């Protein structure tokens, strides 16, 4: 059973919903149906949402595999917390205009750290 992964998947889905509603709301209020119409704010919002969709699925798959392979709870939680925190920091940092580079970079570092932890955890379970 993937109870721990489900917790992080739900938290991340909530964040994705928030990011999506920000894009949709901005599009509606500015009557931009397609593309970004040269609007820097919309471009930032869509890139934050897209970046989220680029990193979260593979990380959740790695998290689920690690949990199924019996990885330690602390490893699963460390990776999950790093991913959630990373995505929030990245979204805040990148959404700001001008962007808050330390938050954006910290968010990516935490996201990539989560992926690295899970790669190593899964690789270890394969060879042991």
Image (cartoon, rainbow, N blue to C red):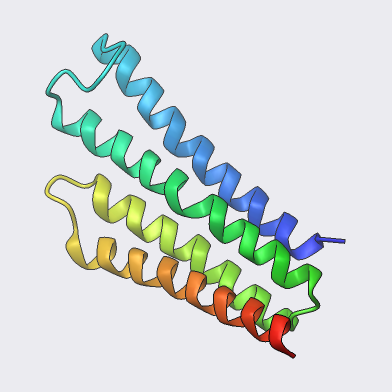
Q: Quadrant of residue 111?
A: bottom left
> Is residue 106 found left or right of 85 in the rendered image?
left
The image shows residue 18 at horizontal and vertical percentages of 48, 37
Decide which of 20, 115 is in the foreground and name it.
Answer: 115
The image shows residue 40 at horizontal and vertical percentages of 14, 32
Residue at left 59%, top 44%? Answer: 13
Quadrant in which the C terminus is drawn: bottom right
The furthest residue to the right: 1
Decide which of 82, 119 is in the foreground and name it.
Answer: 119
Residue at left 50%, top 69%? Answer: 115
Residue at left 64%, top 57%? Answer: 61
The furthest residue to the bottom: 128
Residue at left 31%, top 22%? Answer: 26
Count of picture labels: 0
Q: Establish if 119 lies above or below 61.
A: below
Q: Quadrant of residue 2?
A: bottom right
> Is residue 85 found left or right of 33 in the rendered image?
right
The image shows residue 50 at horizontal and vertical percentages of 38, 40
Decide which of 76, 14 is in the foreground and name it.
Answer: 76
Q: Establish if 84 lies above or below 110.
A: above
Quadrant in which the N terminus is drawn: bottom right
The image shows residue 101 at horizontal and vertical percentages of 18, 62
Q: Establish if 104 lies above or below 29.
A: below
């Amino acid at each position: 059973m993937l109870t721990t992964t489900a917790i992080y998947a739900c938290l991340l889905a909530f964040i994705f919903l928030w990011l999506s509603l920000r894009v949709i709301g901005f599009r509606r209020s500015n009557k931009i149906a397609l593309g970004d119409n040269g609007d820097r704010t919309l471009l930032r919002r869509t890139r934050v949402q897209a970046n989220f969709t680029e990193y979260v699925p593979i990380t959740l798959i790695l998290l689920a595999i690690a949990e199924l392979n019996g990885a330690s709870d602390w490893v699963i939680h460390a990776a999950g917390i790093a991913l959630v925190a990373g995505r929030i920091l990245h979204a805040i940092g990148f959404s700001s205009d001008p962007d808050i580079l330390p938050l954006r970079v910290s968010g990516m570092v935490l996201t990539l750290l989560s992926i690295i932890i899970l790669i190593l955890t899964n690789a270890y379970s394969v060879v042991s």
